[in-house]
Image (cartoon, rainbow, N blue to C red):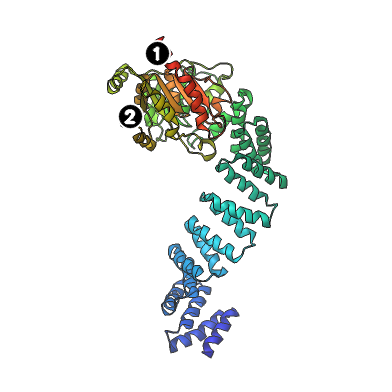
């Protein structure tokens, strides 16, 4: 035993070779000695002989399962880059008895495998052992926020800010959580608090976005301009500034920033952007569509402006739009947007065309009455599939793209908010769902709705169905743009925080004569918008009686 104790002391004095030699003597005497196996393993780790270390440490664990033998083996596996096994043994170790040295290696192993759930658990354990360590608290709140465990994040932000009340990063991040929870007042206050401690990019950018959501547009512009000065290389504040300008219908200041952002987000094979109005009749142009399907439909009204400027015009489109665009724009050669297409001379996005021709949408919008047609045979095909009755036919669409948390989180409306419409008009209207995502199954609760999900193969089918409708009721989504482009009467239900193209208080769309707008009075209050729409719906029957 004295020999083992001597070896351990040598190890602690960092005399690794001497310790190893003494331990090998002990091992030769008794190869089942736990301490000899453990410290031989630790010596080999220090000497970077990890495979040898593994042999001794595995045997040590067999001889005695405890937090040290588990932790040592976990450390060895981490050095061998076997992060899965490292996590298993290190988690067992720190759960049995917490030690910083094992917790810190576990942290590295979890980072290597991007195991955020386990990392949050580790940070909670580390906080229990170091309750006043603000760096651990910052990490803890960060992981809770990333995992959308907002109540937990808020709980520990409160602890952190009591320990460090001037932590401007914490105040900013807490603001992001309240914004995600749709608590704008608290979010705004947190961003302002952050800014009061340090005038830097993040709170200015976030206040710019939050001010726009709250319809404080001049403040939004002020904060975003400051954010651009503080981080001139970031595209996001410039794009957001464009949104704020255009919400106010300021084409001159907003649209060039918007068009420039479209250039920035293009793929690497987008090149030689067309920026003039010169004719290039011996060259080819490729239109790179971007944004959502609604953007592609809305901006296609400008395609006729570039007709004749080039020998040939290609357009990259998602498959669902191929047939309807081919029918309406026969001069375009359609390429699937999944293809990396490079055989062109110039490139442009649809959003650049108004900028090139200086077409200020506040002065003039081409073809607001509609600019799409559908094959009559397809319209007739769907006419035969619909109910034969004297009732009005109304299409509904309640769920849209929610990608992009800050922009589209509020775009979708629970179908239940349309129940007052179903109840009031079930004897006068046949309702048809044109929802083309998993939310179409919401229709199962409402026998008055005919679900056309299985009938719709592409957007041309949607267009043909809409041509058979007396009305579309929809949130802000691509069917609104298709209905507007077809001249189909549409009631669009908007959140308080809407996209720039619908502006602030317009009741009619400048883009589509057939689209009427019903807005929430405050964020999240869908009933307020539906109630306004209900007040208008009786006119449908007057219109039907007096076409």
Q: Position of residue 432 (x, y in %)?
A: 35, 26
Q: Which mark is residue 452?
A: 2
Tags 2 and 1 touching, CB below 8 Å:
no
Sort mark 1 into few (<14), some (14-19) or many (20+) by Cα contacts within 10 Å: few
Q: Which mark is residue 280?
A: none
* Res 232 quadrant in image: top right
Q: Label 1, secondary structure: give it.
A: helix
Q: How many marks?
A: 2
- Seen in the picture, residue 314 relative to 440 is either above or below; the reply is above
Q: Position of residue 81 (x, y in %)?
A: 46, 64
Q: Position of residue 491 (x, y in %)?
A: 46, 23
Q: Position of residue 74 (x, y in %)?
A: 47, 69
- The answer to whether one can see residue 305 in this image is yes
User: In the rendered view of the protein, which quadrant contains the C terminus?
Assistant: top left
User: Looking at the image, which residue is at 52% across and 40% down?
Assistant: 405
Q: Which residue is mark 1?
A: 544
* Res 244 quadrant in image: top right
User: Looking at the image, which residue is at 40% across and 27% down?
Assistant: 423
Sort mark 2 into few (<14), some (14-19) or many (20+) by Cα contacts within 10 Å: some
504 sits to left or right of 289: right
Mark 2 to mark 1 CA distance (whole Å): 24 Å
């Amino acid at each position: 035993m004295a020999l083992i104790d001597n070896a351990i002391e040598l190890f602690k004095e960092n005399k690794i070779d001497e310790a190893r030699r003494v331990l090998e003597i002990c091992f030769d005497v008794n190869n089942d000695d736990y301490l000899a196996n453990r410290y031989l393993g630790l010596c080999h780790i220090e000497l970077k002989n990890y495979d040898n270390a593994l042999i001794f440490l595995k045997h040590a664990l067999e001889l005695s399962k405890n937090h040290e033998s588990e932790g040592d083996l976990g450390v060895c596996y981490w050095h061998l880059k076997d992060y899965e096994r490292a996590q298993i043994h290190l988690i067992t170790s720190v759960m049995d008895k917490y030690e910083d040295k094992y917790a810190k290696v576990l942290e590295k192993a979890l980072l290597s495998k991007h195991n955020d759930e386990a990392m949050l658990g580790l940070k909670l354990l580390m906080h229990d052992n170091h309750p006043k360590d603000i760096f651990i608290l910052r990490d803890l709140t960060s992981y809770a926020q990333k995992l959308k465990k907002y109540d937990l994040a808020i709980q520990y932000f409160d602890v952190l800010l009591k320990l460090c009340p001037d932590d401007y990063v914490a105040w900013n991040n807490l603001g992001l959580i309240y914004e995600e929870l749709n608590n704008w007042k608290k979010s705004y206050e947190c961003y302002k608090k952050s800014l009061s401690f340090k005038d830097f990019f993040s709170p200015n950018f976030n206040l710019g976005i939050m001010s726009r959501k709250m319809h404080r547009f001049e403040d939004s512009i002020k904060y975003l301009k400051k954010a651009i000065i503080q981080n001139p290389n970031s595209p996001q504040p410039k794009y957001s500034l464009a949104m704020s300008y255009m919400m106010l219908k300021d084409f001159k200041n907003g649209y060039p920033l918007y068009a420039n952002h479209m250039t920035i987000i293009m793929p690497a094979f987008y090149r030689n952007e067309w920026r003039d109005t010169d004719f290039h009749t011996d060259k080819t142009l490729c239109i790179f569509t971007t944004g959502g399907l609604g953007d592609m439909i809305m901006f296609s009204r400008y395609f006729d402006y570039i007709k004749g400027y080039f020998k040939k015009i290609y357009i990259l489109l998602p498959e669902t739009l191929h047939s309807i665009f081919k029918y309406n724009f026969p001069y375009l050669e359609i390429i699937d947007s999944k293809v990396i297409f490079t055989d062109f001379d110039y490139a442009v996005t649809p959003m650049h065309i108004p900028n090139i021709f200086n077409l200020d949408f506040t002065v003039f919008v081409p073809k607001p009455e509609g600019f799409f047609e559908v094959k009559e045979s397809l319209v007739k095909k769907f006419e035969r599939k619909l109910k034969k009755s004297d009732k009005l036919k109304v299409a509904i669409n309640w769920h849209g793209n929610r990608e992009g948390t800050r922009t589209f989180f509020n775009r979708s409306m629970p179908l239940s908010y349309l129940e007052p419409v179903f109840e009031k008009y079930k004897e006068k209207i046949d309702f048809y769902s044109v929802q083309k995502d998993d939310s179409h199954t919401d229709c199962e609760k409402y026998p008055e709705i005919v679900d056309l999900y299985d009938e719709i193969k592409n957007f041309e089918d949607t267009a043909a169905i809409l041509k058979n409708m007396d009305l579309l009721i929809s949130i802000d989504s691509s069917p609104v743009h298709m209905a507007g482009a077809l001249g189909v009467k549409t009631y669009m239900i908007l959140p308080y925080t809407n996209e720039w193209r619908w502006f602030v208080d317009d009741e009619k769309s400048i883009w589509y004569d057939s689209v009427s707008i019903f807005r929430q009075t405050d964020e999240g209050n869908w009933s307020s918008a539906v109630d306004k729409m209900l007040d208008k719906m009786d006119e449908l029957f007057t219109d039907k009686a007096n076409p």
